[in-house]
Image: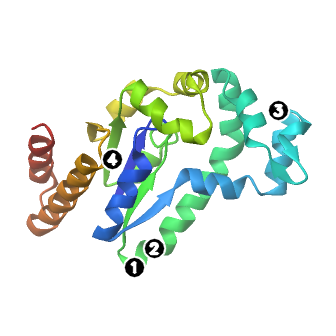
Amino acid sequence: MILGITGLAGSGKSTLCNLMRPYGFHHISADSIGHIVLEEKSVQQELQVAFGDDVVIDGEVQRKNLAKRAFIDRAQTEKINSILHPKIRTKILRTLSEHSDDQVDTTLEAALLCETGLVELCDRSIFMTCPFESRLERVKSRGWDERELKNRDAQQDERLKADATDICWESPQDLGSLQRFSLILDITFRYERACSSKEKASWILQQTISK
């Protein structure tokens, strides 16, 4: 099973993926793969041409400088996405292929899961939502302020994520609720395998998380 998890920054995607590990889920993070892609010289050269020489210094991408230029409007965001996302997608597909024979369950975490079409690879998909204030508290540890979070939010389409995913779930602030949700997911997926009925399992899942 491939479980796609998406949402805006600070919505709890990585936390949920980590909570699914004890249930046997291998975690693939588009963001982590993106960091690897940023180390490629050809990518660094493309970024310098598109956003200025100071986005790469001494062979290392200056993420803050890049963010200031890449996430100011949709046109700039689309420019950086056109450079990075085809390469990220290729690496994700390669990683999934490497695990295909192992029958390993996987959480595929990607902020642009729907926008890049990766959601089509998933057996299930979850859109995690969370109030802006709660997400802001979470992303402060990354050095982001309110302005940067709003800029990044503005470049994403929440309606598209909601329409393209199977489950929309409001992520709570407390870890206990996330742990309960991960357990519910595991039980539901086990039931689905046992009865071979995705539709019935989906109905049970929706009824459970709505309570």
Q: Amino acid at mark 3?
A: Phe
How packed is label 2: few (under 14 Cα within 10 Å), some, or many (20 or more)? few
Secondary structure found at label 4: strand
Q: Which mark is residue 51?
A: 3
How packed is label 4: few (under 14 Cα within 10 Å), some, or many (20 or more)? many
Q: Residue furthest bottom?
A: 102
Q: Nearer the viewer, mark 1 or mark 3?
A: 3
Identify residue for label 2. Answer: 99
Q: Earlier in the sequence, mark 2 or mark 3?
A: 3
Identify residue for label 1. Answer: 102
Q: Amino acid at mark 1?
A: Asp
Identify residue for label 4. Answer: 125
The quadrant of the picture occupied by the C terminus is top left
Secondary structure found at label 1: helix
Indicate the position of residue 71 as horizontal and vertical percent values.
66, 28
Task: Report whether residue 1 is seen.
Answer: no
Q: Earlier in the sequence, mark 4 or mark 1?
A: 1
Query: In screen coordinates, is 132 left or right of 166?
Result: right
Residue at image location 22% in from the left, 50% down from the top: 181
Query: In screen coordinates, is 41 left or right of 82?
Result: right
Asked which quadrant contains residue 69, the reply is top right
Give the distance between the C-alpha atoms of the residues marked 3 and 4, in whole angstroms: 33 Å
Q: Amino acid at mark 2?
A: His
Q: Are marks 2 and 1 in contact (CB under 8 Å)?
A: yes
Please state the total of marks drawn on the protein image.
Answer: 4
Give the distance between the C-alpha atoms of the residues marked 4 and 2, in whole angstroms: 19 Å
